[in-house]
Amino acid sequence: MTLSDQDKQRIREEEKERLKIREQLQSKQKRKIPKWASIGCGGLLLLIIIIVIIAIASGGNKNTSKDITLNAAVRFTGTQFIIQNNDSFEWDNVQLELNSPGIFSNGYIYTESVIPANTQDIIGAMQFAKSDGTRFDPFATKPMQMNISCDVDSNRGYYTGTWK
């Protein structure tokens, strides 16, 4: 069987196309991202996600309200805490936190709906409890710090006091 010149030319063109496609596939395989680069990108993405979560948890999404420093006094009698609101306005949705260790908090919490202006609130030490239900025992643990946060109109009020 003899091929015509036209058939021979067509075969040459097909072979050239096959060679071109084969070279393109080989160059794509050479350009693959190294394994260590993809691990590095994944690690960077994880770090960014962690930073965003911490920013949100620490108040990165605050609304337009402003923080107010509360005029408070806190005394400890040995079995009770005396919380004095020395402001001319009431504190709403009050959260008192005793011995808070840090950002994500695992201190002893007590909540009060309202502490009126220029009044005091007396709270038994064992009313403070952790999220797991563990109560504060004033005979076993020394109070070190008291944080107060509350709503004041459309703002948020804060106080921190410590004992030596």
Image (cartoon, rainbow, N blue to C red):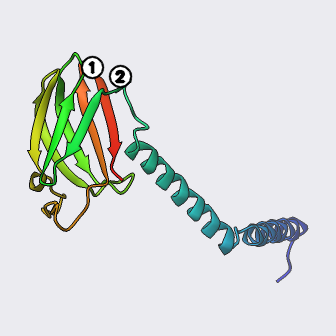
Callout 1 touching callout 2 (CB < 8 Å): yes
**Quadrant location, the N terminus:** bottom right
Question: Which residue is drawn at the image coordinates 17% and 27% (left, top)?
Answer: 92
Q: Decide: is 74 above or below 100.
A: above
Viewer-nearest residue: 155 or 125: 125
Q: Earlier in the sequence, mark 1 or mark 2?
A: 2
Viewer-nearest residue: 102 or 61: 102
Assign a secondary structure to mark 2.
Answer: loop
Question: Which residue is drawn at the image coordinates 86% and 80% (left, top)?
Answer: 2
Q: Residue furthest front?
A: 77
Q: Would residue 153 appear left or right of 10 to someone viewing this image?
A: left
Question: Which residue is drawn at the image coordinates 86% and 64% (left, top)?
Answer: 6
Displayed quadrant of residue 65? top left
User: Badge 2 is on which residue?
Assistant: 65
Viewer-nearest residue: 38 or 126: 126
Q: Decide: is 48 above or below 157.
A: below
- Whole-percent x and y of residue 47? 54, 58
Q: Amino acid at mark 1?
A: Ser
Q: Would residue 35 appear left or right of 147 to someone viewing this image?
A: right
Displayed quadrant of residue 79? bottom left
- Whole-percent x and y of residue 151? 23, 27
Q: Amino acid at mark 2?
A: Ser
Circle number at residue 5:
none
Assign a secondary structure to mark 1.
Answer: loop
Question: Which residue is drawn at the image coordinates 84% and 65% (left, top)?
Answer: 13
Displayed quadrant of residue 94? top left
- Whole-percent x and y of residue 122? 10, 40
User: Badge 1 is on which residue?
Assistant: 154
